[in-house]
Image: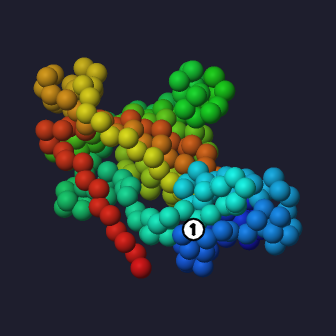
Amino acid sequence: MKQKIPQYIYIKEYIQDQIDQQVWKEGDLIPTEVELMKIFSVSRVTVRKAIDLLVQTHYLTRKAGYGTTVNPDRSLLSNFTLVQSFTNEMKEMGLATKTMHVEVEKVLANDLLASIFNIQNGDMLYHIVRTRGTTIPLIYSDTYLYPVIELPLDSKALYGSLYEFLSKHQVYFSYFEEFVSAVHAKQEVKKLLQVEQSNPQLKRKRFSYDVTGKLIEYTETFYNAQQYEYRTKIFYKK
């Protein structure tokens, strides 16, 4: 296993598994960096990189002069799943979905995108625009994807679930960040969603990260608020 994945990822997954299995419980000190270096025969830089990822995903907290501890309730929070695709949301509601329009192209990152993805200005990204719904349009998605794989520029390949397409090509996400607000979308978006000009839209910004903590997907999605209610289901797995 160590030969298949980077050492810091192996260490990160080992620590995370100890927490998820409640071997190390909330408030517990995890082994010190020196102890982890000896256990895995790696450098301090490698150990710190693994711990940094777990701090970013809120599994651990560093306390100066004390050590690194398991976050309160992290063992419970790790059992919840909060994010799902639009396709799965519609399936749960018993509705058949379809993609009404797709555009995909290669673009060069501007200042804003470069800062979002922490890349260089002018680096290549994929830009995917989609309108999806049932018998009427419900969402308009504006997605930028870091080129971890080569996407087909034939839009027909992306008429299904984007996440299912990515998983078939061994691209998986470790965690997400989402921000939801009510806004007045641009006129072109309102036209595509077939909504009245005076009505606000529900906007969701999603940041999707891989196991190393690297941002892979940034999406702004606008919902037809007259027809769509944003839902989140929380599942607890014992």
Foreground of the two, 73 or 56:
73
Quadrant holding the N terminus: bottom right
Quadrant housing residue 76: bottom left
Residue for point 41% across, 79% down: 238
Q: Which residue is drawn at 66% across and 27% down?
A: 120
Which one is nearer the viewer's eye here, 65 or 142?
Answer: 65
Q: Where is residue 191 in the image (x, y as percent from the top left)?
A: 21, 25
Asked where in the image residue 93 lies, by quadrant, the reply is bottom left
Residue 192 at x, y = what percent?
24, 29
Residue 156 in sight:
no
* Residue 175 on image: x %, y %: 50, 54
Residue at position x 57%, y 21% from top? Answer: 111
Expressed as whole percent of the image width and height from the top left, the position of residue 204 reads 34, 39
- Tag count: 1
Q: Residue at x 49, y 35 (%)?
A: 144
10 Å neighbourhood of mark 1: few (<14), some, or many (≥20)?
some
The amino acid beneath tag 1 is Gly
Q: In which quarter of the image is residue 123?
A: top right
User: Relative to 93, is 27 above or below?
Assistant: below
